[in-house]
Image (tube, rainbow, N blue to C red):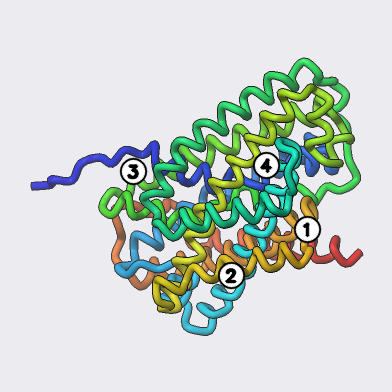
């Protein structure tokens, strides 16, 4: 007799949504202004479909594997030890880079909200969030659910306030950087680190696992599109500067709401990504549980050392490191299907889909590197 019962998906879906809605959302309006909103929407539609497929592929790999891993561990399981260590290096660097971006934004939003030192506020935030990471994923999931609801409410408020200021011509203007949204959107849609964490809620419910991923990802993308369209419509090319400066023109209350939204969004992402990074060392490198959290010091050291950039850094990390993750997911998924039994959920896609997607991400990486050099 099957005694399994459905698992509520709201919490796990919020876990994915909270992971995605972080630093990337604050770069989206600037990317849309740089490319033009129509180009941004084309990229958003294409990448939403691709990223949903990749998240589901990764979920299938997790379901097919008996042992608990994180990205490098799954890569090593199916592609060998050399691929595992390449994935490990990119995971540590990419995740640390993302956490660094969060610390930079903590500084910006803290100074907009309170008359405090931004650096001190970022260090305090890093300390508190790192403590939550050490407490474990169950604690994080509960915090994520509440904070995701709050930040969505704040985003709705900001959209409502900015909507009356929309100028139609801003919605159809074109920019001179059509490739900038590629990396920014990848960064903003990157929730791979949440997949192994979500699996702890769906040890037997593969279809519910997939449903939670679909709801979480597509819901966030819809909010991204609305947020980008409203802010580009309201501010046009001016949104390419500091987002806080543009929002401040709407009044003090919207600026406070933006700062609160920013702090909540970054906090939720920091929690899951920090947990993923710690678990990567713990599960895939067999580093003792008490020592693995030391890796969280790395982004703090870079931050204190003065590494502070935003939109270009988001685009670069998104295209390069999310692109590398996508490459490993595609080949790991293809290999896992040949080596393991079919789980309770599997992606309905032909194996040849790997090749055009590898070409897409490879082209994106080359374009971003070329853009950085030129």
For label 3, count other residues whose C-alpha is less than 10 Å away and answer few (under 14), some (14-19) or many (20+). some
Check the image and report above or below for 304 versus 251: below
Of 69 and 151, nearer the camera is 151
Distance from disc 4 to disc 3, alpha carbons, whole Å, reads 27 Å
Distance from disc 1 to disc 3, alpha carbons, whole Å, reads 40 Å
Percent across and percent down for residue 372 are 85, 63
Circle 1 is placed at which residue position?
308
Residue 92 is tagged as 2
For label 2, count other residues whose C-alpha is less than 10 Å away and answer few (under 14), some (14-19) or many (20+). many
Circle nearer the N terminus (1, 4)? 4
Horizontal relation, residue 264 to residue 231: left or right: left
Circle nearer the N terminus (1, 3)? 3
Of 196 and 346, nearer the camera is 196
- Residue at the location (51% across, 78% down)? 84
Distance from disc 2 to disc 3, alpha carbons, whole Å, reads 30 Å
For label 1, count other residues whose C-alpha is less than 10 Å away and answer few (under 14), some (14-19) or many (20+). some
Of 275 and 87, nearer the camera is 275
Circle nearer the N terminus (4, 3)? 4
| Kind of element beneath mark 1 | loop
So how many labels did they put on this image? 4
Circle 3 is placed at which residue position?
208
Distance from disc 4 to disc 2, alpha carbons, whole Å, reads 22 Å
Circle 4 is placed at which residue position?
25
The part of the image, by quadrant, that contains residue 9 is top left
Task: For residue 54, say whether it is visible.
Answer: no
Horizontal relation, residue 227 to residue 30: left or right: left
| Kind of element beneath mark 3 | helix
């Amino acid at each position: 007799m099957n005694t399994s019962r459905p698992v509520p998906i709201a919490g796990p879906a919020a876990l994915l949504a909270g992971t995605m809605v972080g630093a990337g959302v604050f770069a989206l309006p600037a990317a849309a202004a740089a490319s033009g909103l129509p180009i941004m929407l084309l990229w958003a539609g294409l990448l939403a479909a691709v990223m949903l497929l990749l998240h589901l592929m990764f979920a299938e790999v997790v379901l097919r594997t008996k042992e608990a891993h994180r990205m490098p561990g799954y890569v090593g399981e199916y592609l060998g030890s050399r691929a595992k260590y390449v994935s490990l290096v990119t995971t540590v660097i990419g995740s640390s880079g993302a956490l660094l971006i969060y610390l930079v934004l903590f500084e910006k939003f803290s100074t907009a909200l309170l008359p405090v030192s931004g650096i001190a506020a970022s260090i305090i935030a890093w300390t508190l969030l790192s403590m939550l990471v050490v407490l474990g994923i169950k604690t994080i999931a509960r915090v994520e659910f509440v904070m995701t609801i709050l930040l969505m409410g704040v985003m709705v408020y900001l959209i409502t306030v900015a909507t009356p200021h929309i100028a139609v011509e801003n919605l159809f203007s074109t920019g001179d950087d059509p490739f900038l949204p590629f990396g920014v959107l990848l960064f903003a849609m990157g929730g791979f680190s949440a997949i192994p964490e979500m699996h702890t809620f769906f040890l037997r419910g593969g279809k519910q696992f997939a449903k939670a991923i679909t709801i979480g990802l597509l819901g966030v993308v819809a909010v991204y599109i609305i947020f980008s369209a409203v802010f580009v419509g309201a501010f046009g090319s001016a949104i390419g500067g500091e987002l806080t400066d543009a929002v401040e023109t709407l009044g003090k209350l919207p600026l406070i709401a933006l700062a609160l939204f920013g702090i909540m969004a970054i906090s939720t992402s920091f929690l899951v990504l920090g947990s993923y990074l710690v678990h990567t060392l713990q599960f895939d490198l067999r580093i003792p549980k008490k020592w693995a959290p030391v890796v969280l010091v790395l982004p703090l050291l870079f931050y204190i050392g003065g590494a502070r950039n935003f939109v270009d850094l988001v685009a670069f990390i998104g295209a390069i490191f999310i692109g590398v993750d996508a490459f490993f997911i595609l080949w790991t998924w293809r290999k896992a299907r040949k080596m393991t039994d079919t789980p309770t959920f599997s992606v309905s896609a032909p194996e040849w889909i790997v090749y055009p997607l590898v070409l897409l991400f490879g082209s994106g990486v080359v374009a971003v590197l070329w853009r950085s050099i030129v």
